[in-house]
Image (cartoon, rainbow, N blue to C red):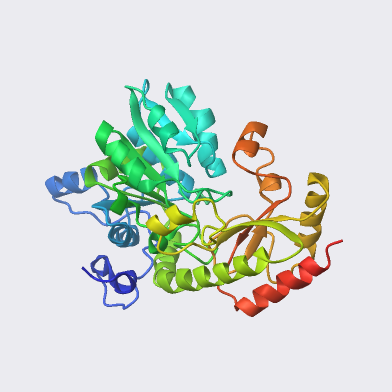
Amino acid sequence: MQRTETALVHQGEHFNTTSAVVSPIFQTSTYYADNDLDIYIEAATATKHPTFYHRHGNPTNSQVAELLAHLEQTEDALVLATGMAAISTAVLAAVQAGDHVIAQHAHYSGASLFLREFLADYGVAVTFVDQTDNEAIAAAIRPETKLIYVETPSNPNLAITDLAFVGKLGKEHGILTMVDNTFSSPINQQPHVFGIDVILHSATKYLGGHSDLTAGAVCGTKVFIDKVWKRSLVLGASLSPFDSWLLLRGLKTLALRVRQINENALQLAQWLDGHQAVRAVTYVGLPSHPQHALAKEQMRGFTGMLCIELEGAGEADQFAKAQQLLGTLKVFSNAASLGGVESLIVHPASMWGGHHAVEQKTIGGIKLGLLRISVGIEHIDDLLADLAQGLAKLS
Ligand SMILES: *Cc1c(COP(=O)(O)O)cnc(C)c1O
C-alpha cells in the first residue's frame, strides 16, 4: 500500500481518462450514453456511476472518494456537497422510525440541530451523553439502539471521545458506530483502526484546506456507502464538479499543511499558556488537557484547534475583552469555519448564539469569555507577535 504522502498525490488517478497530468474539471451535468439500451440500463442503475448524470457521480468525485477511502482505510467512500450533507445522509442511512441513537452533549452545531430537532420528527429517539464518560455511553444502550454518533475532538470545547471503547462497544452490541473526524483529519487520527465503522468529514475544513470550497465525505463499507449514495441521489446532495476539483487539488498538500499546523498550534498553545492575560488554554496537545493521555493514544498529531479564555473580572468583563482582542488582531481574522491555511479566531457563544440552548452551552463548555482559534500555516513568529500586541492592549 502506498504511503500517505504518495497516495495524496496519486490515488485515484485512473479516473482521469485524458493525458493531462492534472485531472480536468468535468464541468458537465450529463454524459453521452451508449445507444445499446442494455448498457444504458446498467449505467442508469449503477451506484456512483462516474459518467452518467451529475447527481449519480462525476469522475473527480470518484477520484476524491477513492483517495479518502484509502486515507481512512475503509472499503469505500462518497463525497457530498457539504459536511452537513455527509452527516445527515449518513445518519438517515443508518436509522429508521423506532430506532434509537446515542450522541454527545457537544457536537458541531449543525449536527446538534439535526440530532436534536430533526430526528424526532421522523420517529428516531436520541440520548445525549457526556462524551468523556465511557460508562454513560454504555449505559445509554437500549434494545433498539442502532447508532452511536461521536465527534472527537469536539467543537469547540475539544473534549475527547475514547474511540477504542466506542468501537468495541459497537461491535459487542451490533450497533453501528460513526465519528465526525473533521477536526483531526486522517493525518492526525484514523478512527477505523479503533473499530469505528463510519467516518465523516466536513471537507470544507482541513481536507480542502484553503477556505475556497464546501464539501463533505462519508467513509465506510461498500454496502453502507451504497445506502448513503441512494439518499444523496434523492436528496440532491451531490458535490459540484468545481468544488470537487478544488478539493482534489487541496488534498495533495494535506500532510504538509497538517504537519505545519500541528507544529504552529503547539507552540502557540504553550506560549498562550504562560501569558498573564490568558486564564485558560485548552489544547489536546498540552499535558494540562484533562484527556491528554487518551489523545496521545488515539491521535498522531493534536490539530490546529485551540480555545482560550481571557482573564477578567467576571464573565461580562471577559466578554468585553474578547470583543476588544478581535478588534486588535491583524494576522488572525474573525471568520466562521476552520482548517484553512489562514489563522482564524471566533467567539463561539456569538457564532452559535441563536442555535444552542442554554443547557447545551453550559454542558458543552461554551463560556461567554471563550475564543476558538484555528491555527494556519503562517510563520509562527508572526502569529505570536500578533497575539502579543493584541493581548498587551487589553485593559
Ligand atoms: C464545519 C463542520 C461541519 C459541517 O460542515 P459543512 O461543510 O459546513 O457543512 C461538521 N462537523 C464539524 C466538526 C465541522 O467543523
Q: Residue at x 60, y 79 (%)?
A: 379
Q: Residue furthest right?
A: 395
Considering the image in quadrants, where does the C terminus appear?
bottom right
In which quadrant of the rendered view does residue 141 lie?
top left
Q: Position of residue 331 (x, y in %)?
A: 69, 71
Q: Position of residue 365 (x, y in %)?
A: 62, 43
Drawn side of residue 276 relative to residue 12, left or right: right
In this view of the protein, which residue sits in the foreground, 61 or 341?
A: 341
Q: Residue at x 48, y 40 (%)?
A: 131
In this view of the protein, which residue sits in the foreground, 133 or 323?
A: 133
Q: Position of residue 288 (x, y in %)?
A: 57, 57
Q: Residue at x 45, y 35 (%)?
A: 103
In this view of the protein, which residue sits in the foreground, 33 or 298?
A: 298
In which quadrant of the rendered view does residue 44 lie?
top left
Drawn side of residue 88 relative to residue 335, left or right: left
Q: Residue at x 64, y 32 (%)?
A: 359
Q: Position of residue 257 (x, y in %)?
A: 47, 71
- Tell me: residue 19, above or below residue 269: below
Drawn side of residue 102 relative to residue 309, left or right: left
